[in-house]
Amino acid sequence: MNIEEIEERTIRSIQNYCYGEKVKLDSAFREDLDLDRIDKIELVMALEEVFEIDISDKDAESIFTVKEMVDYLAKRLLPNVLNF
């Protein structure tokens, strides 16, 4: 797995919750994609399944944009490749 695959899979998963909104890396979950708290919880659960990892509630609460989510996942999945 590489950063491009993480980005693609993340955006594809987020798109399922955005009801026609265009998902971009700089999209904010609330402001740009109109995801409410429940949508975000469901999205985090879906990403946990897609990437087969656990995302703590504390970590999820500190992620506000698609880019932040991609960076978080990359850090978790590619710890020896990326230095954040």
Image: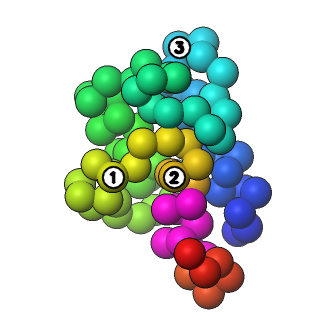
Question: Which residue is at 58% across, 28% downward?
Answer: 15
Q: Is residue 5 above or below residue 9?
A: below
Q: Which is nearer the N-term, disc 3 or disc 2?
A: 3
Residue 40 position in % (x across, y down): 35, 35
- Nearest the eye: 75 or 6: 75
**Could you tell me what secondary structure mostly forms the magenta stretch?**
helix
Does residue 60 sit above or below 37 in this rendering? below
Q: Tell me the CA gap for discs 2 and 1.
A: 9 Å
Q: Are marks 3 and 2 in contact (CB under 8 Å)?
A: no
Q: Amino acid at mark 1?
A: Ser
In this picture, residue 58 sits left or right of residue 73:
left
In this picture, which residue range is highlighted in magenta?
71-78
* Residue at screen point 40% across, 27% down: 30
Asked whether residue 6 is in view, the answer is yes
Please give the residue where the numbered disc 2 appears in the rendered image.
Answer: 68
> What residue does disc 1 label?
62
Q: Nearer the viewer, mark 3 or mark 1?
A: 1
